[in-house]
Image (spheres, rainbow, N blue to C red):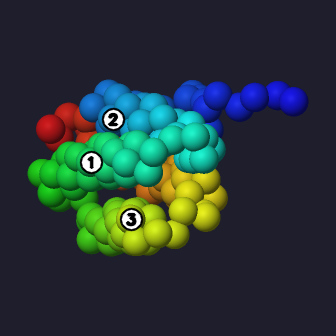
Amino acid sequence: MEEKHSLIEWEEKYILGIPLIDRQNRDFIQVLNKLFLVSIAVREIVEQDFIKAANEAITCVRYNFWNEEKLMFLTEFSEHPVHKKEHESIIYNFLNFIDCYIHGNHEESSEFVKFIKSRILSHITVMDRIFAEFILEMIKNGKR
Ligand SMILES: [Fe+2]
């Protein structure tokens, strides 16, 4: 049986061309992979390890979103409110899951990590890309 060592492999299609955001997204994927490894080994680990990995992931994603939103504000990106709502929704899902886990529901941890992975990757490839294109266009036109 093939052993899976990571949930997400970093691919070129995730590169948005904004070094700060790309670096943070890459860091987040590493943290998410770590969370995935912990979640599939859930029987062998102490509950605290999973909570620690989940908290590390949420701290990382919050920091990434905060930086993006700061850039959106500074560049007066018109879709900032919609984008911010999507960030808040992802964070809500994440916090809700951690809360359920802490309160004893350990059944769905691997499924949740897969779910949050697909939400984050679709966010990067759709909404973050729209923002990155806006920034790159702005740079090209010498506005900032
Ligand atoms: Fe974003």
Q: Name the disc covering residue 59, or none.
A: 1
Observer able to see residue 114: no
In the visual, does 76 lie left or right of 68? left
Quadrant in the rendering for residue 13: top right
Tell me the residue at 34%/45% (across/down).
52
Residue to which mark 3 is pinned: 102
Q: Residues within 10 Å of mark 2 (few under 14, many from 20)?
A: some
In the visual, does 60 lie left or right of 97? left
Is 10 in front, or is 72?
10
Is 29 in front, or is 40?
40
- Cα distance between the residues tagged 1 and 3: 17 Å
Tell me the residue at 71%/31% (across/down).
4
The disc labelled 1 sits on which kind of residue? Thr
Secondary structure type for disc 3: helix
Observer able to see residue 41: yes
Secondary structure type for disc 2: helix
Q: Position of residue 101 (x, y in %)?
A: 45, 65
Front: mark 2 or 1: 1
* Disc 3 to disc 2: CB gap under 8 Å: no
In the visual, does 94 lie left or right of 42? left
